[in-house]
Image: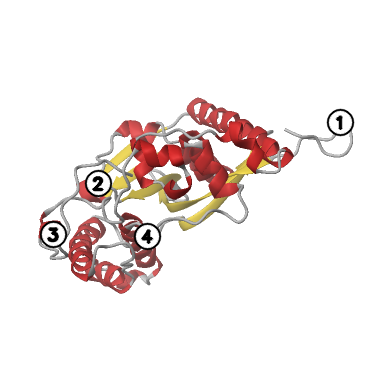
Amino acid sequence: MEQLGFEGMPRRLYPCTPTRLSTWLDCPRRYRMSYLDRPPPSKGPPWAHNSLGASVHNALAGWWRLPQRERTVTSAGDLLDRGWLSDGFAGAAQSAAHRRRWRQLVEAYVAGLDPAAEPAGIERTVATRSDLITVSGRIDRLDDRREPGRPAGPGDLVVVDYKTGRHRLSVDDTRTSLALALYALAASRVLRRPCTRVELHHLPTASVLAWEHTPQSLARQLRRAEEIAGECAAADEQYKAASGAAAGEAFAPRPGPGCGWCDFRAHCPEGAAAAPPRRPWDGLSLDASDEQAGDGYRRPAPVLTE
């Protein structure tokens, strides 16, 4: 980390997000193209699974913003229909088939919620800092929960993250999530209330994967974030010192099967050689609606994606 102008002054804190840190871990070259190259390289076409995920997240956020009396199962489905994003789908029939399926999933999920249980935040941006970094991010939902029998007043905060991918999740995904741990730390510090429980709500399987952190486990995750951020900061400085293109060694690609999903695959020979390109709709779940979409495409081989 570089020092400020005078000896003895504190270090400049490295600003980051969980997404930035995870991108560095996943592939330094993709990190460079995403955060350092200006202008950034052109991306491939939009992904249908991203459109689907954004549609669901927007509908659930919109449902909680309705007046309490309007938070019905049907209103959640209507919000999904009105805000459905069709970018990346193979065609109108496939998009409509998945919209119908996800209306059912969203309505089933909302049917298990208490409309009167007002969250502490919806798509709430939180931030915190340590001696080395500042980190910020946006939480899908921040619940305010009070144990039965507890006196009236604010309860503990719970970080809730919606998941729409076809990959079946486990509690280990929740336990090891750097993002969820940093969100819990930031929420606790911003709102000055306990926040140690984090949850992944996986709508396709109607499952809630929860983990209860301890102060020690949250501190370990913060140290992990600081270590990753230190690597990012060093690479950023090398990029600047080498005027961008000459800093290739710090941003070596990590080619593998996932390269077929990379937005920057066209700009990475190693990634292009490592995996065939994926079609924009290949990340969608495989179910009967795909068979009936009528767009003349074949079902892709099973691939687990976020």
Q: Earlier in the sequence, mark 2 or mark 1?
A: 1
| Spot occupied by residue 288 in the image (x, y as percentages of width and height) | 10, 55
Image location (x, y in percent) of residue 176: 41, 31
Amino acid bearing label 1: Gly
Give the residue at mark 2.
166
Place of residue 158 in the rendered image (x, y in percent of width and height, measured from the top left): 42, 45
Real-space Cα separation, disc 2 to disc 1, in angstroms: 51 Å
Question: Label 4: which residue?
Answer: 54
Q: In 3D space, how far apart are the residues under numbered discs 4 and 2 (Cα atoms)? A: 15 Å
**Gap between marks 3 and 1 measured at Cα:** 64 Å
Residue occupying the point 21% across, 62% down: 98
Query: Residue drawn at (29%, 53%), measured in percent from left and top?
Result: 279
Q: How crowded is mark 4: few (under 14 residues within 10 Å), some or many (20 or more)?
A: some
Disc 3 marks a residue whose amino acid type is Ser
Query: Would you say residue 246 is visible in this rendering?
Result: yes
- Measured as percent of width and height from the top left, residue 145 is found at 39, 47
> Which residue is rendered at x = 66% and y = 33% of the image?
234
**Three-letter code, disc 4:** Ala
Asked if the residues shown at circle 4 and circle 2 are in contact, with their CB atoms under 8 angstroms apart, the answer is no
Of 95 and 104, the residue lying toward us: 95
Sequence-wise first label, 4 or 2: 4
